[in-house]
Amino acid sequence: MHKEITIYDLAKKLKLSPATISRALSDHRAINKKTKKKIVDTAEALGYRSNTFASSLRKKKSNTIGVIIPRLNSHFVASVLGAVEKIANDSGYNIIMSQSMESVAREIANTKTMFNSRVDGLLVSLAYDTGNIDHFDKFIKRGIPVIFFDRVFEDDKCVRIVIDNFKNAYDVTTHLAAQGCTRIMHITGNLKRNVYAERYNGYRKALRDAGLPFQKDLLLSGELNEASGAAAGEKILAMKKLPDGIFGANDTSTASCMHVLKQGGIRIPGQIAIAGFNNDPISRIVEPNLTTINYPAYQMGEIAATTLINHLAGVSSISNTNIIVLRSELIIRSSSLKK
């Protein structure tokens, strides 16, 4: 094994003081350009690596932002991360990303890793089964800012960035009712999570306002992936009395469900009008094109990262901010237009 090169090795080789080597590698203006270049070139040639952990201990700042997400398998999450990484990199920050895989136990393990990595701040979208946010208390007690986005927990200790899921779900369901649907099914995720609970509540309120009864057989829950959407389609085909409208809590599972229904001979929207949520690319590819809610994922990532970095830089403070609600709206396409 090769010995790790240190600044003392560089100092000995170049016959300079370790302090001069350190300043040059930190791009200090007190070191002239010629000497600085000589030191940097020698460091690269010998394979010197900066000890960023030791540096962060000295500076009490790592210039790193932690991001915890449920899964990296959706267009929404990918869009959020793309925005976060751009804003962070433009501001001189790196990001460390981890997945909870929809498990609170793994989410807790992720927080320990982030804490031990000395991140300057944390952006989080919660797992399916997270029942409290006690595992984030160690960050809050140390003054490390935590911002939740999309899947959040109702707690004033941290900033939440969301859309109005209740209103959006209400608008979708009301639209389906206006198309003449009287048996509107809702395909949802785990109702522990705010996003799905709020969409469910908006669906229920829209049914009441339209004079339609809530029927338990018209509520299906699952993981909201392609497989669960297909399973929902099979269950619907097996029903004695079909729904005449479907509101799915995301586009992936809804599009998969629609595909199974079409294969089963169901006319869409003639027999069943269908709407999803998120405005993922698949909503514009499936036939008929899927009615959905435009979810500004990239904007959410931009605002989350900018809010966190501005707080870290002292430009603004998150101490007086509890919740940021982004604008989102219904996009009506042919999958739901019975009339």
Image: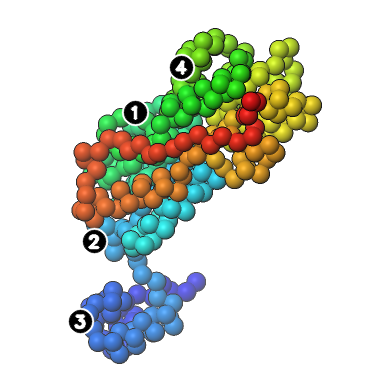
Determine which of the numbered discs, if any, sits on residue 116 in the image.
Answer: none
Q: Secondary structure at mark 3?
A: loop
The type of residue carrying mark 1 is: Glu
Q: For label 2, count other residues whose C-alpha is less than 10 Å away and answer few (under 14), some (14-19) or many (20+).
A: few
The type of residue carrying mark 4 is: Lys
In the rendering, at what x and y percent does residue 206 appear?
48, 18
Q: Secondary structure at mark 4?
A: helix
In the rendering, at what x and y percent does residue 137 appear?
29, 36
In this picture the colour scheme is rainbow
Seen in the picture, residue 244 relative to 162 is either above or below; the reply is above
Residue marked by disc 3: 30
Report the front residue among 262 and 139.
262
In the rendering, at what x and y percent does residue 336 appear?
62, 29
Give the quadrant of residue 238: top right
Q: Is label 2 in contact with label 4 (beta carbons under 8 Å)?
A: no
Q: For label 3, count other residues whose C-alpha is less than 10 Å away and answer few (under 14), some (14-19) or many (20+).
A: few
Report the front residue among 147 and 333.
333
